[in-house]
Amino acid sequence: MAHALLEILADRVLIYDGAMGTQLQGANLQDSDFILRAQPGLPAKVNAAAERMGGRVLEGCNEALVFTRPDVVEAIHRRYFDAGADLIETNTFGATSVVLAEYEIAELDYEVSLAAAQIARQAADAYTDKFVVGALGPGTKLISLGQVDFTTLETTYRQCALGLIDGGADALLLETLQDLLMVKAAIVACNNALSERGKQLPIFVQVTMEQTGTMLLGSEMGAALNMLECFESVKAVGLNCATGPAEMAPHVRFLSQNSTRPISVLPNAGLPIMEKGQAVYKLSPDELAQWHTQFVEEFGAAMIGGCCGTTPAHIEAVSKKLSGHTHTADVAWRRVRGLFSGFDFSIRNDEQAAAVPLRGCSSLYQFQPYEQDNSFLIVGEKTNANGSKAFREMLAAENWDGLTELARELEGEGSHVLDVCVAYVGRDESRDMAKLLHEYNRAITVPIMIDSTEVPVIETALQCLAGKPIINSINFEDGEERTEKVLALCKKYGAAIVALTIDEKGMAKSAEEKVEIAERILERTRAAGLPDYDVFIDCLTFTLGSGDEEFRASAMATIEAIQILHDKHPLVNSILGVSNVSFGLKPAARQVLNSAFLHFAREAGLTSAIVHFSKIVPETKIDGELWKCVEDLIYDRREFAPA
């Protein structure tokens, strides 16, 4: 059964409240209102903190007001409801322990969230069809900059989410988000909290795009959306804060064209103007209402409201124009109906999606489509301890700057993704992976392919990377237990997967065996909820350089399997470690054979390859006789074989 909030959202536009901070600033609060005092009725933990604080003024800690002035907080909620808001946000913007630690009350993250949700719930219950959204802000420390770690963030957001759930919130909102890795930690935390309480509340996510056109750390909207849509629990995506509606318009348009989830838009009341040392917001209520009318009618926005500088007057103007407004645009109607009425997140084909989804991976900075115009998805192979002597030596010396520069070189050569493997005998793979990926997350703009056979290492890596990485790889060599664990990590953290055609009997050699195992893989990935386009089937590459009779037809079998799978499952991606085909040959021969093998695999439908791209040359650059020679080798043509 769908959540009541989502059912109403499917029928009409919902209106958020406006700024809480603006209203608190106008409430004539005194220093005494920010002193935490022990009193009957408060949780023991809160009273213990009050005794420890000894009457100190918690200046600027608006969250403390849920204990000291709950009447003021509830009155603000009611004013927004009276103005026409359908959704009110709890007074928990800075409720995480990271923020509360600045006031020496970090241990109260759960208690603050619980009290705030209870206050909002009491206000909402005095009306009909009004909803409480448990809102959590970005905190004051950025994980991608190394100011806080993933576990700390996940722990406190989980505590806050538990408090909001226990206090009666109808939904959870992560807002004003500036760092995609922090967003990921918060979503994981909310999902864990919901699972712990046995609840299925919707999660809404709103990122903040600066006047530069990106998030604070440089993330494009495509990178954010691509990551967010990995999480089925995220039922709406949008924007809030930093700018006014005019500056948000291009990003709202992008979401309208690409988001498969309902869109929310909560702008500031214009860009702030400094007057007498204070920021003043000049956008009038009617102007905000006009912008929201455009967002709803032209771009299909489903939830609208206000952020900094907006007041009950702004929300009233928006409500008068758009309260009860139905989703007249087909794209918006299909997007919101898709939340709970048959939308298949595992396939997401064009018939089901309300927009064209972003099929690709992403880094902290940018979205990388799987489908490349006139090319293939190039996965750089030199950031791998198993295949690069230079990488291995720098890893042994812990030359992290050198390893980062090597990655930049691959990026400069045209690699769309980097395959990163730090497995090296005698070293701590988890430690090395964490250290290197923390560097790569900030310094490398292309997405990362996590290459490891160890499940704990993969999870460590996923906690280091913003965006949507690719995991390399799964197979059935040791049965299905490890595969199920890795696929669960893909869903938990948001990642695509590479799957090798290997089963309990070993590596598939014939085309028929490869296809059979690939079909089995797809059964598992679909059951795990991964869309087909996030699956990369590796039909395996064996060397043709050994002269071994067993492998003479191996390249041909691989190409044939790629063709069959491409025709049968057009959304599924394919990948090969191309250089394996020439292992054992001299460098000049390897370059020609690698280039030809990649050429024929691409003709069969190969969509991506792990290669040293600068060493790949087109057919037109290779002597005709030499090309014929390697083509005969690939297709096992024995023109001069004895009769």
Image: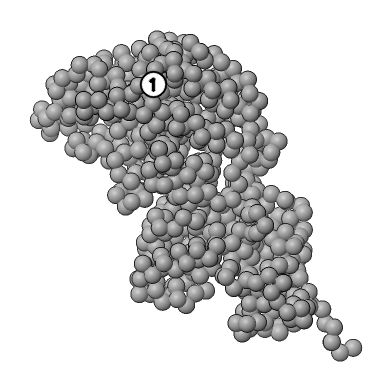
View extreme (right): residue: 643
Q: Is residue 507 above or below residue 325?
A: below
Residue 498 placement (x, y as % from top left) = 59, 58
Q: Quadrant of residue 584?
A: bottom right
* Residue depicted at 56% across the width and 15% down the height: 325
* Residue depicted at 62% across the width and 71% down the height: 616
Residue 256 placement (x, y as % from top left) = 57, 32
Left or right: 271 as drawn, with respect to 574: left
* Residue depicted at 63% across the width and 20% down the height: 328
Residue 549 placement (x, y as % from top left) = 74, 82
Left or right: 278 as drawn, with respect to 548: left
Quadrant where the image shows the C terminus:
bottom right
Q: Is residue 498 above or below residue 279?
A: below
Q: Is residue 66 visible?
A: yes
View extreme (left): residue: 54
Q: Secondary structure at mark 1?
A: loop
Crowding at label 1, few (<14), some or many (≥20) Cα neighbours within 10 Å?
Answer: some
Quadrant where the image shows the N terminus:
top right
Front-most of 287 and 639? 287
| Number of numbered discs | 1
* Residue named by callout 1: 283
Q: Is residue 344 above or below residue 567?
A: above
Q: Is residue 227 visible?
A: no
* Residue depicted at 45% across the width and 64% down the height: 408
Kind of residue sitting beneath label 1: Leu
